[in-house]
Image (cartoon, rainbow, N blue to C red):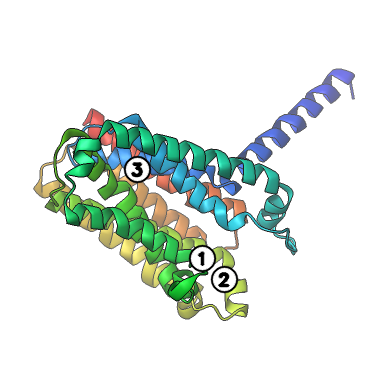
Amino acid sequence: MSSAHLKQEDLKKTTNGFLAKLVQFVFYGNYFYGICVVILSIEASIQQGFGLNHWSFYVLIGCTSTAFYIIPYIRKPTADNGNQRVQWYNEHQLTLKFSLFGFIAAGLTSGLIFLVKCLDGVVQIYWYELLLLIIFPLSAVFYYGIDVGPFKRINLRRTGWLKPFVIGFVWAGWVTVYPIIFYGLEYGEHFIPTFRGCLLTLKNFMFISMLGIMFDIKDYADDKRLQLPTVVVRTGLKRTLFYIIIPVTILGMGTFLSYAVTHYFHLGKILLNTIPFLLLIVLAYSLKQQKSVLFYFVLVDGLIMVKGICGIIAMVYF
């Protein structure tokens, strides 16, 4: 074998190794979620007929979302038991800690910038708008639990079957309701619920909840051993796929198609918005076979970004 061929093989291995580490960094480090939150927020704003928010809003929700997902993994190293994800967390604790500090600092700074810019709107906020601003992050906090005071026993994550629906509820509010409330604060308008907004919130809730159930499949064996009553453990793998995820997704797609046809959507808009539903069904079907942890992070979570991008393109070009 020639030296040139050997160098080419070494370069290929180096490139593949770098890409693998980059993918692990983005997905295991939970940085991908911050990007997805921003994209879904832009999609929801456009779909509801609003303009884009001030840049500080996107920095705020992107950074705080990423920080929220990082916090649970700032801990002492634990036995990885062959789990590639846990091993990555054990090896990158310092990176996670610096990242957490950076995201919190950026989130607080951007929040302060938005507050100063929109102080008049903030002062005139209605009580129900304030309630909506509080209920979603509060649900997120109670998802992991608070180890102080009378709230010590509240940990929604321990209620296994409730997990994906809490995640879906928080995401739906964070990316569908928040952009509109903050837009109103910026331009002196008050949030008024609309039928379209409610449908979009329900759509995001359903979509993220189904992804959450799919994500629980990767922990099926451990959750069953620990007797954690997740949807998958209570229902069984195949029943979860064929009696819950796929039927609910088909129902959601059917609801969207009915709304699209009755409101005379352009064919291009209909097709683009149907893609995430179809991909979710295909991925759910593929989970009959065991998949790697990274498969769930890249492909299952990747559907969040696909949904947002398809929605934005559909609204801008059709």
Task: Please give the name of the residue rendered at 35% of the width and 30% of the height, measured from the top-left corner.
Answer: 55
Q: Which residue is mark 2?
A: 220
Quadrant of the drawing holding the N terminus: top right
SS of the residue at dot 3? helix
Task: Please give the name of the residue rendered at 56% of the width and 54% of the height, measured from the top-left corner.
Answer: 71
Question: Are the residues flagged by discs 3 and 2 in contact, CB closer than 8 Å?
Answer: no
Q: Earlier in the sequence, mark 1 or mark 3?
A: 3
The amino acid on which the numbered mark 1 sits, given as a three-letter code, is Asp
Task: Please give the name of the residue rendered at 11% of the width and 42% of the height, measured from the top-left corner.
Answer: 264
The amino acid on which the numbered mark 3 sits, given as a three-letter code, is Leu
Question: Are the residues flagged by discs 1 and 2 in contact, CB closer than 8 Å?
Answer: yes
Quadrant of the drawing holding the C terminus: top left
Q: Residues within 10 Å of mark 3 (few under 14, many from 20)?
A: many
Q: Residues within 10 Å of mark 2 (few under 14, many from 20)?
A: some
Image position of 98 with respect to 244: above or below: above
- For the residues labelled 1 and 2, the Cα–Cα distance comes to 6 Å
Image position of 199 with respect to 56: above or below: below
**In this rendering, position of residue 60 left or right of residue 300:** left
In front: label 1 or label 3:
3
The amino acid on which the numbered mark 2 sits, given as a three-letter code, is Tyr
Can the viewer see residue 239 in this picture? no
> Residue pushed farthest top?
4
Q: Which residue is mark 3?
A: 40
Q: Earlier in the sequence, mark 3 or mark 2?
A: 3
SS of the residue at dot 1? helix
Picture quarter containing residue 211? bottom left
Q: Which residue is mark 1?
A: 216
119 or 143, which is in the foreground? Answer: 119
Q: Position of residue 152 (x, y in %)?
A: 49, 74
